[in-house]
Amino acid sequence: MRVLAIDPGFERIGIAVLERGVPRETLVYSACFTTSSKLPFEERLVLIGKEINRVIDLHHPDALAVETLFFNNNQKTAMRVAEARGVIIHTGVSRRLAFYEYTPLQIKIAVAGYGKASKNQVASMVKKLLTISNTAMHDDETDAIALGITCLASERVRKGS
């Protein structure tokens, strides 16, 4: 199974492609995709959709995993992230990818073994679970990788393999 994992946003989007492997998962691709705040919001959404399509065309994933929204106090930001998330889900599902979503709590438990793990603890575990050559990753990219690990682990448990 190959999964495209997305940490949604509209300014920075964490993207990772992971593949199930033995004895461990393999990181195929990761990046932090950015859009300019100088662009109209609707154009930023178009760019996000184009980037997701580009990654799908390049890496041929079987599934899309997206982090659920964590609502903060800034409703405008939360709404815009929800809109970007909608574009991401629409793009993946319209390309016939299986769809999975996970909460931040599920991701922390799956990767770090503790639901209140810090971002640093999750990032540290990501680097222990995978062979990663790029050590200077943005948080959004690391979050997407952690999401991909969670999806592959969850699917392995569901299928009993």
Image (spheres, rainbow, N blue to C red):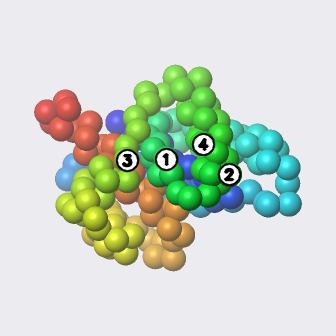
The one nearer the camera, 46 or 96, is 46
User: Which tag, 2 or 1, sits closer to the chain's start?
Assistant: 1
The residue depicted at 60 percent of the width and 42 percent of the height is 82
Disc 1 from disc 4: Cα separation: 7 Å
User: Residue under circle 2?
Assistant: 76
User: Which tag, 4 or 2, sits closer to the chain's start?
Assistant: 2
User: Residue under circle 1?
Assistant: 69
The amino acid on which the numbered mark 3 sits, given as a three-letter code, is: Thr
Residue furthest left as drawn: 160
Q: Are marks 1 and 4 in contact (CB under 8 Å)?
A: yes
The one nearer the camera, 111 or 26, is 111
User: Which tag, 1 or 4, sits closer to the chain's start?
Assistant: 1
The amino acid on which the numbered mark 1 sits, given as a three-letter code, is: Leu
The amino acid on which the numbered mark 4 sits, given as a three-letter code, is: Ala
* Callout 4 crowding tier (Cα within 10 Å): few <14, some 14–19, many ≥20: some
Answer above or below: position of 77 versus 49: below
Q: Position of residue 31 (x, y in %)?
A: 57, 59
Disc 3 from disc 4: Cα separation: 14 Å
User: Residue under circle 3?
Assistant: 103
Disc 3 from disc 2: Cα separation: 21 Å
Answer above or below: position of 132 versus 90: below
In the picture, measured across the screen, residue 36 lies left or right of residue 84, that is right
User: Which tag, 3 or 4, sits closer to the chain's start?
Assistant: 4
The amino acid on which the numbered mark 2 sits, given as a three-letter code, is: Lys
Residue 5 seen in the current view: no
In the picture, measured across the screen, residue 18 lies left or right of residue 24, that is right
Q: Position of residue 55 (x, y in %)?
A: 60, 43
